[in-house]
Image (tube, grey):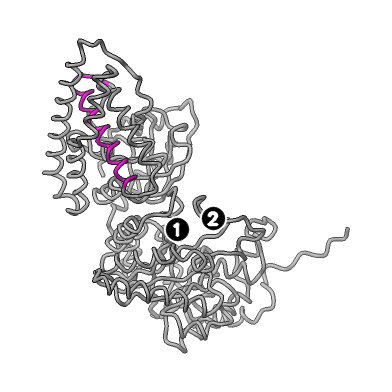
Amino acid sequence: METPSTSVTEAASEPAELAPVLLRGTSVAGGFALGRARRSGQNLGAKPSTRVPKDQVPRELTRLQAALEAARAELDQLRAELPAAVPEDHARVLQTHATLLGDAVFLADVEKLIVEEQLALESAIARAVADFDRIFQLVQNPKLRERAVDLRDVGLRVLRAVERQGGDAGGEPGSLDGVVLIAPELTLVDLLGSDGQRPAGIVTAAGSLAGHAALLARSLGVPTLVAVEGLLEAVEEGDAVLLDATEGVLHVRPAPEVVAQFEQAEVGAPPGVCPEWAEAPLRTLDGTPLRLWSAGGSLPEVQRGRVLGVEGVGLFRTEVLFLLEREAPSLDSLVEHYRSVLSEAGPLPVSFRLLDLSSRLAPSWLELPSEVNPALGVAGVRLLLRRGSLLRRQLAALLQAAATHPAPVEVLVPFVTDCGEVRAVKEALFEERYEHRRRSRPHRDDLAVGVVLETPAAVLGAHDLAREASSFLLALDPLQRSVLAADPENPELAPHLERLHPFTLRAVRQVVVAAEEHGIPVRAWGATLDQVDNLQRVVGSGVRDLCLPPGRTEQAVRALRALDLAQAEVLADRFRLQSTPPDLAPPPPDAR
């Protein structure tokens, strides 16, 4: 990425009237961008309803035809240039937009508003698009909603063509070099300027991981962040901004030291280049090989893990797409999203964790009743089996998306307590696979089913579950919470959750023994692995596969390379025999 002119860095260094702000969102396409904020005018409803004298109506109709021709020329140019940079199916949306430019109903509505209500062209287009948008939003049909988004994009493109023809400075301003667009939603018009220019980055207040613009943002490598709460209130036109879409954050008016760190990182670690610490195979000090897997829930994390040379994606969380949308994502949206994940993974195996929601973390459209203790309620696989359509849709999407992936693909069943839940998921998978075969739909015929072990019941039944599962994923954090009956939101109990308890480590060893006896792999995952002591004790207890977010991998790799495995095994054995953590004695009784 080309760093914008020095003025951006200098501006970030100047005393600012407003304090720096850090905003978080959901990454659509990873990467960094440092530049000036430019607010994109997308609000068609805010366009004033300007009327013209009757004798100027023919002029407005002529302006409409000229704007349509200009917009068609832009799309033709983009269609000629874009396929060289993105997959053909991703660029196909431009053909859809070209078709919409000639849509008879849309054009008839615009012309009618100009002729009968004497609206100026800009007002007529804004009104027509807004009317279509309201109609489509009332229909519970993802295809029609996608059409509404496309139509709004087309309307914006025509409006900007009108503004350019009129020399309006409020239209699309000159160069996009060093510009980070700030917008209500992600649109193709913002992603692809009139002459094919692309901004350094895009940040939106709303949006999702699906949709045509999101697909193209990923294909073109434009750092993009969506669903950023408070964005439009926090960012002003011309603000210095630093976008780190890989980590999902936007620094508004960043402090000079933040900018300096960014610039050093850009020089020291170019995107897509494996850092020196990750180049050699991962082995302990005594030469025992270990396997590193990536964990995450976004495409940039998959991409970064692959650069680091991981064995595969050991855990891909699938909740984000469901949490962003106002209704359950369509089958087509899920298929496209999972294909993107597999495409980023390249030749690596991928394990998708099925939807893991509860009444504490669930979209409003699920309408889940509140529970006193959501962590012990209808969550994970329990919810999936009660909302069978969600389970079936995910399984169908994964079967289709994985049809041509060159490496193994697996689903992980969350919050398992017994074998019956795993068998029910496998039965649903069998039926979906049979339906695909019957309809001659391309699909994956060997989709595996693994189990997330995060409940004491799953640990106690590990030998039984190992007969049903293709692999185990040890979720250390929720397992420790359950073993210790400790609420992570209670600050008094936080110290008990930072270090793995000896009893939790006994559970880890029990799972490892069960997995070894039945010949299935077991991976460990959890934020507790960030602590070197925990990491060493888990490896010392027999775990050889570790699942880590790419951003938290370096410290773990360095610690593992310095680990004497024989010593770690002895220390882990001793620790598991403890009846209480030696460094965390219980408080004395309250004298009151």
Where disc 2 sits, the SS reads loop
Front in this rendered view, residue 236 or 498: 236
Front in this rendered view, residue 181 or 331: 331
Where disc 1 sits, the SS reads loop
Q: Is residue 206 left or right of residue 125?
A: right
Quarter occupied by the N terminus: top left
359 part of magenta stretch:
no
| Three-letter amino acid code at the position of disc 2 | Leu
Mark 1 and mark 2 residues within 8 Å of each other at the beta carbon: yes
Q: Residue 533, how many percent across, how many down?
A: 55, 69
Specify start and end residues of the magenta stretch as a single range. 144-169
Q: Quadrant of residue 341?
A: bottom left
| Three-letter amino acid code at the position of disc 1 | Glu
Q: Earlier in the sequence, mark 1 or mark 2?
A: 1
> Does residue 142 show up?
yes
Q: Residue 551, how many percent across, how many down?
A: 41, 57
Q: Residue 302, how many percent across, how many down?
A: 34, 60
Give me the C-alpha separation between circle 1 and circle 2: 10 Å
> Does residue 294 show up?
no
- Residue appearing at x 42%, y 73% in the figure: 428
Residue denoted by label 2: 361
Front in this rendered view, residue 137 or 69: 137
Q: Quadrant of residue 98?
A: top left
Residue denoted by label 1: 319
Q: Is residue 305 left or right of residue 582?
A: left
